[in-house]
């Protein structure tokens, strides 16, 4: 008899009470807190309801299915809330999923006061004070007095600085953690400086300024709670590109004689940095600088996504699960024998 067989079911569940999504294994009985990332009530062919959910913590997401109390739980659960789930981890269609227990109290609503934020909130691995100081050094490289003045008014604003150092760069896709926006911004600016060494006809001042400010609207797009990162109402209804332009134009309005042509070029770089209309940019890049910014922004976001996939992948698999954001599986390599 195995040692675990000697314990009653509740105690065996507590063995995995500190586990995260990325650590779950088939056939484990679990009692764990998760954030509700999505939910959808569906029906079988014989009209039996079941609830499909995506549950998450800071290490990833896992699908869950409730066959027994689907309507009841669908009516009371809200996306973004934290719940404690009792169930069993199984393999379905080559993916892990949780089958919720039949008990009516197998899903328990949790108050934010009892939520351990460390389960849901990841932080940048870098020192944000040092990252911000690095941005200020890049600001000092800008020779154009109007652009440097704009960077001063943005970065030295105490409210903007505080938000910039805390904000994530996304809710899910890339740099979706505390300090993620600052980390992403610094990396894009580093890349800009490297590219300007190669293509010396680029407007370096404009590129540095746009790299630092291209995502500034994200400080208003996301909110952080113990349950993780979520969109603000403004972020959902207006979006970070529009809010970023609003912030820039407000500061530019306070700078006397700011050249209209310079405003237009900077504005274009911010609104086009997603590169394509279907990815959220109102226009596509139409200057060398705008194209460079888009490509470097995309490069850093893609590398961050690949790093996230590598860190959360199952150790025994040479391939990741299909990633809907990247539209592909990622080859993780095989152990050499």
Image: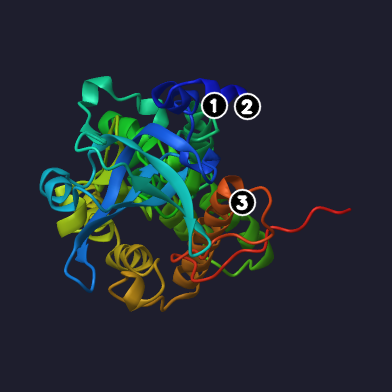
Mark 3 lies on residue: 310
Using a 10 Å C-alpha cutoff, classify the residue at mark 3 as few (fewer than 14 neighbours), some (14 to 19) or many (20 or more): some
| Residue position for label 1 | 5
Label 1 sits on a secondary structure element that is helix
Which callout, 1 or 3, points at the residue further toward the start of the chain? 1
83 up-or-down from 112: above or below? below
Give the residue at x 35% y 27%: 117
Residue at horizontal 35 percent and vertical 39 percent from the top:
167
Asked whether disc 2 touches disc 1, contact meaning CB atoms under 8 Å apart, the reply is yes
Residue at left 48%, top 28%? 16
Does residue 136 appear left or right of residue 247 in this picture?
right
Q: Position of residue 303 (x, y in %)?
A: 58, 56
Q: Secondary structure at mark 2?
A: loop
Give 218 or 258, whichever is nearer the viewer.
218
The residue identified by callout 2 is 2
Residue 254 rendering spot, x and y as whole percentages? 20, 46
Which residue is located at x 21 percent, y 64 percent? Answer: 42
- Residue 308 position in % (x across, y down): 54, 49
Residue 43's tag is none
Q: Is residue 301 left or right of residue 285?
A: right
Q: Are marks 1 and 3 in contact (CB under 8 Å)?
A: no
Disc nearer the start of the sequence (2/3): 2
Determine the residue located farthest toward the right in the rendered image: 337
Element carrying mark 3: helix
Q: Is residue 30 left or right of residue 299?
A: left
Q: Residues within 10 Å of mark 1 (few under 14, many from 20)?
A: few
Which label lies toward us, 1 or 3? 1
Any part of residue 181 in sight? no
């Amino acid at each position: 008899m195995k040692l675990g067989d000697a314990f009653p079911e509740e105690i065996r569940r507590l063995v995995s009470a500190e586990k995260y999504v990325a650590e779950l294994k088939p056939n484990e009985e679990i009692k764990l807190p998760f954030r509700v990332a999505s939910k959808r009530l569906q029906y079988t062919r014989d009209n039996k309801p079941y609830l499909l959910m995506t549950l998450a913590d800071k290490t990833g997401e896992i699908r869950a299915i409730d066959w027994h109390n689907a309507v009841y739980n669908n009516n009371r659960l809200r996306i973004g809330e934290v719940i404690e789930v009792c169930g069993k981890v199984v393999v379905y269609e080559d993916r892990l999923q949780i089958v919720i227990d039949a008990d009516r109290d197998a899903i328990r609503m949790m108050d934010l006061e009892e939520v351990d934020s460390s389960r849901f909130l990841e932080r940048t691995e870098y020192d944000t004070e040092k990252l911000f100081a690095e941005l200020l050094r890049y600001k000092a490289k800008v020779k154009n007095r109007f652009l440097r003045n704009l960077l001063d008014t943005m970065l030295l604003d105490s409210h903007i600085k505080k938000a910039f150092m805390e904000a994530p760069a996304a809710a899910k896709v890339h740099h979706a953690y505390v300090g993620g926006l600052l980390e992403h911004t610094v990396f894009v600016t580093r890349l800009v400086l490297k590219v300007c060494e190669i293509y010396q006809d680029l407007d370096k001042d404009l590129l540095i300024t746009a790299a630092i400010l291209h995502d500034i609207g994200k400080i208003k797009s996301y909110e952080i709670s113990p349950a993780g990162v979520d969109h603000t109402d403004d972020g959902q209804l207006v979006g970070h590109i529009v809010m970023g332009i609003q912030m820039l134009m407000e500061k530019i309005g306070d700078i006397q004689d700011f050249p209209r042509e310079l405003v237009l070029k900077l504005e274009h770089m911010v609104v086009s940095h997603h590169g394509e209309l279907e990815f959220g940019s109102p226009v596509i890049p139409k200057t060398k600088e705008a194209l460079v910014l888009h490509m470097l922004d995309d490069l850093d976001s893609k590398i961050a996504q690949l790093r996230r996939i590598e860190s959360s992948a199952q150790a025994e698999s040479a391939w990741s699960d299909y990633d809907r954001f990247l539209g592909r599986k990622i080859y993780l390599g095989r152990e050499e024998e």
